[in-house]
Amino acid sequence: MNSKPSFMLIGPIEAGKSTLFKALLDREGDVRKTQAVEYGGEVGVDTPGEYFSHPRLYHALINTASDIDTIVYVHPCNELQCRLPPGLLDIYGDKNLVTVITKTDLENVDPDQIEEMLRSNGVKGKIFRVSNTDPSSIDELRNYLLK
């Protein structure tokens, strides 16, 4: 196994990062609001949404990502606006960038619309759609991240 975490989840508050992190690592128990960077053994890192949502905290994301192979931008399917700060992901030019659309099981959401909106806001690369009610969607992402 790698000596460094292979992926890091970033995204806005309430995007579902911690729920996704727990599912990817097959962890039991309740999901708690992430207050600080959380490491999942040697495979992953979960970051607080505040690090993503407040420019004064970007340095924390940038520093945490230095030893990461893959940056995973997490966007909830019920958020119709792109909150991805322009140029933030460009900092990680040497990293594999992946986007995950979460909460695809919610009523009245349109994952196609969200993906189109993300693409129109400059999101490139592979996009996964996941739902906690569809274990195969989590398995597909896990297999990709931990390959």
Image (cartoon, rainbow, N blue to C red):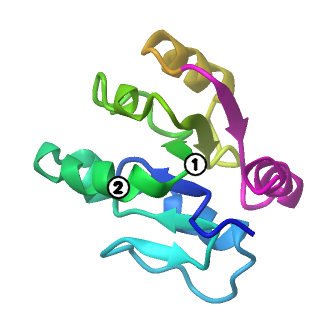
Q: Quadrant of the N terminus?
A: bottom right
Which disc number belongs to residue 55? Answer: none
Give the magenta range: 124-147
Which mark's residue is nearer the viewer, 2 or 1?
Answer: 1
Q: Quadrant of residue 35?
A: bottom left
Q: x, y (%) of residue 114?
A: 56, 25
Reply above or below: 114 against 18: above
Of the pair 114 and 122, the residue shown nearer to us: 122
Residue 14, x across and y down, in percent: 41, 57
Farthest residue in the bottom direction?
29
Outermost residue on the front side: it is 3
Q: Residue at x 47, y 56 (%)?
A: 67
From the viewer's perspective, is 7 left or right of 27?
A: left
Find residue 27 and report its image quarter: bottom right
Kind of residue sitting beneath label 2? Ile
Residue at label 1?
Answer: 69
Toward the viewer: 2 or 125? 2
Considering only order in the chain, which callout, 1 or 2, is on the residue closer to the N terminus?
2
From the top left corner, tell me how far across and down residue 12 is, in percent: 36, 48
Q: Where is residue 124 shown, x and y percent of the image?
A: 56, 19
Residue sitting nearer the eye, 4 or 25? 4
Query: Crowding near pointer 2: few (<14 within 10 Å), some, many (20+)?
Result: some
| Image position of 125 with respect to 140: above or below | above
Does 41 appear in magenta?
no
Q: Residue furthest top?
A: 120
Disc 1 packing (10 Å; few <14; some 14–19; many ≥20): many
Task: Identify which residue is drawn at 58% across, 65% down.
Answer: 44
The residue carrying mark 2 is 13
Q: Residue 130 vs residue 143: left or right? A: left
Q: Identify residue type, mark 1.
A: Asp
Taking the spot 67% from the left edge, 31% from the top edge, the residue there is 127
